[in-house]
Image: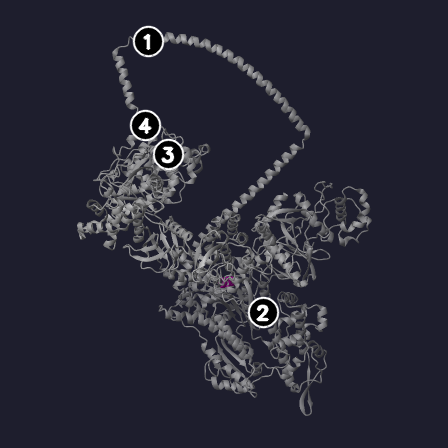
Amino acid sequence: MSSFWACFCLLFCLEPPITSHEDIYLVFFCKKEEGFRPMHPTSVNGVDDMIRLGDLNEAGLLRNLLVRHKDGIIYTYTGSILVAVNPYQLLPLYTTEQVHLYTDRRLGELPPHVFAIADSCFFNMRRNKKDQCCVISGESGAGKTESTKLMLQFLAAVSGQHSWIEQQILEANPILEAFGNAKTIRNDNSSRFGKYIDINFTKGGAIEGAKIEQYLLEKSRVCRQAPEERNYHIFYCMLMGMPAEQKKILSLGNASEYNYLTMGNCTSCDGRDDIKEYAHFCSAMKILMFSENDSWEINKLLAAILHLGNVHFEATILNNLESCDIMTSHHFNMAVKLLEVSLSLTSIPDSMIMFASIMLCCSVFHQAIYGRLFVWVVGKINKAVFKPPPEDTKYVRQSIGLLDIFGFENFNKNSFEQLCINFANEQLQQFFVKHVFKLEQDEYARENIVWKHIDYNDNQRTLDVLANKSLNILALIDEESNFPKGTDTTMINKMNQVHGKGDVYVPPKNNHDTQFGIQHFAGVVHYDSKGFLEKNRDALSTDLIQLVEKSSNKMLKQAFQNELSSNGEIQLTVDAKKRAPTLSGQFRQSLDALMKTLTACQPYFIRCIKPNDFKKPMLFDRDLCMRQLRYSGMMETIRIRKAGYPIRYTFDEFLERYRVLLKSSLCDPKDFHDTMLELERMKELNEKALLIQRVLRGYKYRRQFLRQRSSALVIQKNWRGYKGRKLYRLGFARLQAKVRARQLQHHYQQKRVAAVRLQAQTRGYLARKEWQRKRRAVILLQTNTRGMLARKQTFLSAKERREEELAALERQRQSITAQEMVDDIFGFLPNMVGGQEGQAPAGFKDLEKQGERTRPEEVDLDDLPMVEDIPEEDYDDLDEYSFSKFASMYFQGAATPTHVRQRLRQPLLYHEDEGDVVASMTVWWIILRFMGDLPEPKLVQGQGARGLRGSNMVNNSLDPDLPPTVQTISEEDEILVGEGPTLDRPMTALEKLHSIVGYAIVRRDLRDEIYCQICKQLQENGNRSSFYRGWILLSICLGIFPPTERFIKFLQSFIRFGPMGYAPYCAKRLRRTVANGVRGEPPSWLELEATKSKKPIAVSVTLMDSRTISLPVDSSSTSKEICQLLSEKVSLKDTFGFSLYVAIYEKVWSLGSGREHVMDAISQCEQEVKRKGGQEQHAPWRLYYRKEIFTPWHDCKEDSVSTDLIYRQIIRGLRFGEYKCDKDDDIVQLSAKHFYVQHGSDCSLDNAKTVVQDCINASLLEAKTQDKWLQMVSTAHAQGPYINSRQKAAGVKAEVVDYARQKWPLFFSRFFEAAKLSGPALPKNKFIVAINWTGITFLDEKERRLLQLSYPEVTGVNTMRYSSGKTFGQSVSLLTLKGDFSLNAAMAGNIAELVHMFLGGLRERSQYAVALQEVNQDDPTFLSFKKGELIVLIKDDELTVGRGWIKGKNERTGKTGAVPIDAILVLPTLTKPTNEVMVISKNVAPERLWVKSREPIKQPLLKKLAGNSELILDLCLPILKYMGDYPTKQIQSPLELTDQIFGPATKDEALRDEIYCQIMKQMTSNNNRFSLEQGWQLLWLCCGLFPPSQSLLKHTQRFLESRRREPLAPDCLQRLQGSLRYMKPRKLPPHQVEIDAIQQNSTQIFHKVHFPNDMEEIFEVNTSTRIRDLCQTISTKLQLVSSDGFSIFVKTPDKVLSLNDSDYFFDSLRQITDWSKKAKSVKEGGGPMNMSYLVFFMRKLWFNVSPGRDLEADLIFHYPQELPKYLRGYHRCTKEDMVNIGALLFRVKFNNDKTQFVLIPKMLKDLVPNDMLKAMSTTDWQKPLLCFLSPKEMFDFFQQTSDPNFPDIVRIAISKQGVSIIHPKTKDVLATHPFNRIANWCSGSTYFHITVGNLVKGNKILCETSLVKTFITVLFLMLEILNFQGQAPHAPQAPQVLHAPQAPRAPQAPPAPQAPQAPRAPQAPRAELTCFASTYSF
């Protein structure tokens, strides 16, 4: 008892309080071991997802559904499974707002909804590229059909195309429901068949088709219904909604008159309007392409079934046999008539003579007619909505399947149909169990996941008994059906024997009982076996088939076509043993196919729950719902979903999905939840999307600004024009007055000038006279004063004079000269800065005598120019580039351009890189300290005098223990140069200088900042010391790095005002630095000394003949300049290959003869000395001038100076071991030649010793004695041939040089470090590329050859730039016969340049070529040869290469003749090529696909199109024909050729790159000028149609940029950039107008545009002009107030069509003209033809149009367009208004000419509406004008079939208020649908459909008209306008007025009449010009 009171008290302590006994039941759980527990908080108000329930039991589930059902929330999640409770009422959950709300949302992000499941299907289909399916299950009446329709509506809405196919799929439901749904006890709209709708989507997510599969229609319902049930809906709808005249023809009455409709005593259904449903059914039939004849034939068969059901039979006895008679009946005769059979009362077949037989056969026949009619209807629907997939194997179709199948049924009497239905539900339950329980738990077990097995209700045993095991129930039924004597009793006996002992099968209670039971997953169901076999056989007797065969009803035969052969006869079974398939067998096959389809898809489940059996809202039957929850396994589902792992990705899938979140290359994402990752992913993607939006919005606002600016210019232009005209109207009098006034003014000015001159002379005379008087007085005063002072000076004491002298000396000491200040700044420099001092480098000591350097040749540094003069800047235009102006434009914040002594808050210029910002502040601090504007910090004890990192930068990078040089410092270093503790200690001036310069060298974006900081500190700097220090710093920086183009003019202007001596010096240094580029090292000591004296630097260069030449250099001098000066100095002509070398100690490296800075090399030498501990100002570096590389065509005879220098270099190389010979004899011969060169024939011993010392290396002298070498050299010299022949020494020198060139090519090479990026395999990927006259060699670090290439093996070379962050570089590609190599090299450009030069020179001098193709010529003038043969070229004046021919000799035949240049490949070689090169060249020659050819290619140029040879040939041939490169007999027009070229590419994006490549290929190496011009025309058209892909874009741009001299190249480049900017390519090939323009070499295209008032204008259009752009241009030119509402129309001979604003102008023209051509060609059966058309500009939307607001628009458009509509009677006007308007029209025609009144009776049709001509007499219409015509809303006639309450023919108007339906006669508005109520719309060929209100139960409007496209276009445009103005709240909204109508408005008072102005009087519109109501017919 105490426990009871405790529980009672607990009830009242709960929050919220318990209010019902059911809640009390849910509070406590009856577990004795646990006692009572309170309700979990989650069960109080319910949860969206039942996985989150705390009370995880049946009671908790039930309460959750109950609580949500009471709140009107019918949807609940169980993980990804949706539980839907049927509300039995329409809830506001299915509006367009809900569709948009649930689109693109993750499951669970919003409250549960069927739209969320549909969106998940759609999203996962597109993301995972996998088909989806949704299984909708539940009992009959649970809402499965409605859920299916909602899913379909959502998918159609998110597809967003408003296409006709979408509406066709949606409209299939009303037809299927009419034929397959019926009212049952449990459901008013019960599906009596199953259907699987497979919806197909394109790659972009748009619906492109669907296919419907139907399962097991309940045909028995046609003849029998249970009590309170109805037959199929179609019968009742037809009888209620069919017009009376049709019913009369079919002899139909009310539903109560027919037996088949009254068996259930229920002919009506609450909540269903059969009349309205029939209208929707008819509309759906039209949408799904059912013809009128199809509909009528269907009605005939349905009526025949009803009539047959009323035929009665009477049992009789005939010949002692049971028989029957057909009662005489009108129904029988009508049925025979409708079925079109010849059947009389006496022609009944013998097989049907028995009464029972005929009753059974009739029922079967009626069911068969209906069932086969249903199958035919489904097939007809599929024919309309199903689009077969294309044959293309690459085409991937995605689909979403929706399964809506009959629910589980358990009636009082269950028959064979219920067994099949419940079997299907068992299969679906097993599918659910398999996916939710079995597969999931098996996967956990496979992956060894710790998992507690969850028990669930598995119905596999039931399926085994029903269908899987041998001798299963369905098999027994089939077996017994195949026995002729089989009965229902024998069938049930067999089932008892086989399954009687099992627990699934429930046998009958006794032997006479015909009921057996099956233990289903939803409970036990008892089936009555009576009639099982007959229903399963589902067979028609042969007599009935013969009856159908004799019928003339085509629809009936089509329905029974499977039973009839192709010729209409009965099909005979070939194999007698082959039985007809039973109904259960067919059902099992279709069900198996369905399960395979579902298994291949990713499934979603919707569990529909029926809340009560009474079909009432807000009634929740707990027991019924609990039973459904139990057998559906929902409890187990929740448990496994709650405990399981719902997200299962493979690791690859996971990384592919979420790699955007990775911050590094490592990832371990297994611990993150999917939702969190999805949110993070969406966050990242949103950031990128916002970035894109920001750019696009900027572009949008920029366009808006440009439009506003253009409008402002228009206003200004018009205002100025108005002012000018106003002034002009003042007339000649004003001009005359001006002239006279000017003449008077001129006379006055002359008189005034004369008077002023007279006054000036007079005043001057008086002033001079007064000045003379005062001057004499002043002289007298000065004389007396000076005398007094002189006398006073003689009396000063000596002490005073001494004091004055001391003060003057003190003042003199305090004044410091500028030179002394400079000397003080450069105090760190020693008195003498050397360089080139000390001992010579190793190997070069012989060039200096006895340790002393050879005295250099004297030069005057001031007179000798360093380089050719650089033109000085024109300073006349620099006045506007002041530094103050630059500061005001670019300085940040409040920074001023003047001198300050404080630290900046931020850099002067803006920097994106944070490192640049920090470096800017550091540089500023150092500059202040360098200039003395800030004091140096005190040295902190212990800090030491360590140099800052900036000073360490100058150390050589050769030492790995020291910091890197400036050249090796990267901008990504963590510690910036000059930062850290360096600013906290004193720094020397040199350290500061190196820091500032180092920053500028490393950070290019910092250079302008440094110059701005220096200039700022120099501007208005009153401190003389700081001022000079700043100019010295500026002059040093100007020699190291240049400013950017943005600042260079301002810097030049600033330098002009420098102190004396610095302005020209700095200007010259700036010009030199800009010309030669930035330095790579800080300034050397030599430069600092030169800067101090402002004089050039003198450096000495030693030649190999021991001569030393002194040359002037500066900070910007390059090796090219030095080599140029040296060659001029020594008269060297053959300068190629001579380079400048720098040497120090044992190191020697080449500076080449290019852009290498000489002072950088000297700076590196000084750093090397410092690294070794020496003084860098005395670095012993040397400069040498040597031969580095030979050309392949080198000739020693061309330049003796060059030969002598090379000869000296070789002799030195022999002596010092640089050049080594393999044999002693070789070096002896070289020594002997040197002997002869030096001493001629003199063979003395002393000379021999000298030669041995000059030529023999020390190591060789050690190997053999000197005497031995003397003997060998003397003997060779004496025996030499040159002694006897007395050969000149120059010739011997040439022999030595040639020997060295041949012997040591590797020593005369140019070397480059490189790394292989791609190409054939090599032993190493990093190597040295050596280029010499023999070819290209790859060497490793030990100089071992990795690969050697001769020049004939090299086919091409090119370079490519790349950038990675702030790192820039180049790569070079070597195209060779051994493979293509891609190399990464710092000097890639030099490699390519050198190889290009060698290849070009060799080809120019080559005499050998290989044949690329076979040529056979009968004419001996031409040479015949085969492919791959060697052709020896003969270069003479007979044939010129410029004409495409050259003379050649066939090596094989020896014949000579003319050879076409295109047919051969000139080999880059001077010698006959080897056989290996010839073989490889022969095989490689066909690969020259990038040059012009006259033959069509056989394969595509792009690999991705491999295999499409025929398609590529179809593209290549037209290109060749257009360019004139392919002969053709039949002349094709350019339009036909361009269609063949560009047509396929506009449809297939993959072909666009191929077309670009083929056109550019034909333009490469094309010497035919006509062909080249035609190719440029094609490329011009192509660039405007579509851009190439990103991979080809840069190559196309490079192609165009490299041919800028071609007239069309710049325009092609501009069009290409435009096509990239517009992003949307053209849809159709070029129009004839475009082709005509480019063929006339005109890049401007003009088109004529007509206006409604017979005006016409010429406007410029281009390829990318859209309709809206052209409308804006026309509106601007016509000075219209706005272009809104106007559009372009195209008039063809039979139609006038409106163009879409977003389409391209020429695409629209092309589409319309092509369509008209095609239609005319089909109609007339002719060939190609020209189609004339006119382009009109007219008002399309009458949106916010007020007469008088825009006078131009009123006169040009409104009046001419509206008048024809008024005269047709489209406006509703009173008689008074019509009289006034008619009078106004008369005045417009004749002005005030009253003499024309007599014409009024004849022209009334032009003044009065046609429908009102008979309303009044002729005289009554003749009244004066009182008001002006104003446009009103316009409409047209439409035929509607959707609403029976409206007339069949209506008028529809689109106005600002919405879509209005108007009575055609009374013109009353029947209904108006606002735009925000329009949920969906679509259009077909002649139909348009609008859904208003709710997506499922909303009103539908279906109309038929020829104006479908126009109507939908206007509807869409109106929606766009209202959406833009914020008046249309949701997306599916409609446009405004129907193509020309204006929005309706209240009548306005007519304005006062006034005569129109003469100049702008509107002309009478042409009689054929009408309005939109007739499709803008002309």
Magenta stretch, residue numbers: 114-122
When the figure is inspected, residue 824 is found, relative to residue 476, above or below; the finding is above
Of badges 1 and 3, nearer the viewer stands 3
The residue pinned by badge 3 equals: 1066
Of badges 2 and 4, nearer the viewer stands 4
- Answer with mark 3 or mark 2, whichever residue precedes in sequence: 2
Under circle 4, the secondary element is helix
Look at the image and tell me whether residue 229 can be seen. no
Q: Position of residue 1829 (x, y in %)?
A: 71, 47
Outermost residue toward the front in this view: 1284
- The residue type indicated by label 2 comes to Asn
Q: How far is disc 3 from disc 2 in space, using C-alphas?
A: 86 Å
The residue pinned by badge 4 equals: 818
The residue pinned by badge 2 equals: 382
- The residue type indicated by label 1 comes to Ala
Badge 1: how crowded within 10 Å, few (<14), some, or many (20+)?
few
Q: Position of residue 1891 (x, y in %)?
A: 61, 60
When the figure is inspected, residue 1123 is found, relative to residue 1426, above or below; the finding is above
Closer-to-camera residue (1601/204):
1601
Under circle 1, the secondary element is helix
Badge 2: how crowded within 10 Å, few (<14), some, or many (20+)?
some
- Answer with mark 1 or mark 3, whichever residue precedes in sequence: 1
The residue pinned by badge 1 equals: 790
Closer-to-camera residue (1819/437):
1819
Q: How far is disc 1 from disc 2 in space, using C-alphas?
A: 133 Å
Does the magenta portion include 116? yes
Locate the C terminus by quadrant: bottom right
Quadrant of residue 549 in the image?
Answer: bottom right
Q: How far is disc 1 from disc 3 in space, using C-alphas?
A: 52 Å
Q: Is residue 1893 left or right of residue 1364?
A: right
Of badges 3 and 4, nearer the viewer stands 3
